[in-house]
Image: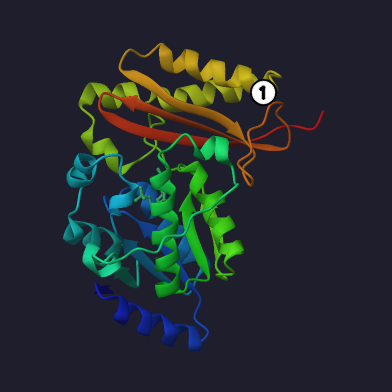
Amino acid sequence: MEIINRISRMSAISSKLISSDVQIGLVPTMGGIHPGHISLIEAAREMTDLVVVSIFANRLQFFSNQDYVDYPRDITKYTELVLQYNVDYVFAPGEEEMFPRDFSTYVQIEKFGESVIGIQQPSYFRGMTTTVLKLVHIVRPSFLFLGLKDAFQGAILRKMIRDLNLGSEVVVTPVARHPSGLAYATRNCFLSESETAAASVIYQSLKSVEESIVRGERQARKIVNEIMRVIGAEPMARLEFAFVADPLSLEPVSKLQGTVLIGVGARIGATSLNDSILVEIPAE
Ligand code: AMP
């Protein structure tokens, strides 16, 4: 395994690999490697010839400067961790390397899943699409491995890749969870013991609506109400968003049919967490 910090070195390696018909799998991360990231690496290992894990905490994707400053950044520890999973390259460019001071070109998706995307700060998505576009140009992956936990990102990046003819394919993998159901997330390290216990309410709300759907509930409004009820019953949690949408277009759904994406975001103490599930609605 090699750790690469320079864009020129990564580009040179990927060009050489592509010319020898090697299929590259890219797992983009912001660091804070946890079992969720490892599940993406394992999927990439299975589907591709060579795995690149990128580690880049993109300032534009943080809710505040403090959130950015506090984010875990122990590259040596993360590299040792991914080394155990047979990763070929870790691409870990510095901020100046990716976004030099005079950087001013951004990619932004318009007229797409606006009601769902509007839940987050607009700069978040611009930051994500711009960074991933740069990573795809540099690493040139055949497949880009993303987690279902961050529900919007798969749909948005798939659309960007199609709109801009980038030629990579998005693979979305299931959410890796603690035994309590809490989705692994880098920000879980900010939770106290009692907050960690309280945070499992996020997955409980998703399980609860899944059960309602099995019992025949088909109204998205009622699903959102149910999430509000479950999260509302946990004093340490504050609901930030809940939605039911089409997983490809991110358009909100009013009556559940086909496959639906259900997403929840909640603040546990000072930490914002999110989770999602895909539900297949049986034909009537
Ligand atoms: P992040 O480092 O938080 O930007 O996440 C990098 C990638 O890992 C994203 O595609 C996430 O959706 C994915 N990911 C994060 N947490 C999990 C999880 N618990 N299970 C599966 N994938 C995850």
Q: Name the residue under label 1.
A: 214
Q: Which colour scheme is used?
A: rainbow
Q: Where is residue 190 in the image (x, y as percent from the top left)?
A: 22, 34
Q: Going 18% across and 43% down the picture, which residue do you hit?
A: 70
Q: Residue furthest right?
A: 284
Q: Where is residue 29 in the image (x, y as percent from the top left)?
A: 35, 56
149 with respect to 253 (left or right): left
Q: Which amino acid does label 1 sit on?
A: Val
Total numbered circles:
1
88 above or below 113?
below
1 above or below 42?
below
Which corner quadrant of the image does residue 5 belong to? bottom left
Which corner quadrant of the image does residue 170 belong to? bottom right
Query: 110 or 128, which lies in front?
Result: 110
Which corner quadrant of the image does residue 192 belong to? top left
Q: How crowded is mark 1: few (under 14 residues within 10 Å), some or many (20 or more)?
A: few
Give SS at disc 1: helix
Q: Which quadrant, please, contains the C terminus? A: top right
36 above or below 268?
below
Q: Where is residue 145 in the image (x, y as percent from the top left)?
A: 48, 58
Q: Going 57% across and 71% down the picture, which residue do you hit?
A: 167
28 with respect to 173 (left or right): left
Q: Going 36% across and 14% down the picture, which residue do you hit?
A: 234
Q: Which quadrant, please, contains the N terminus? A: bottom left
Query: 159 or 37, which lies in front?
Result: 159
215 with respect to 51 (left or right): right
266 above or below 249?
above
Q: Going 55% across and 16% down the picture, which residue do you hit?
A: 225
Q: Position of residue 260 (x, y in %)?
A: 64, 36
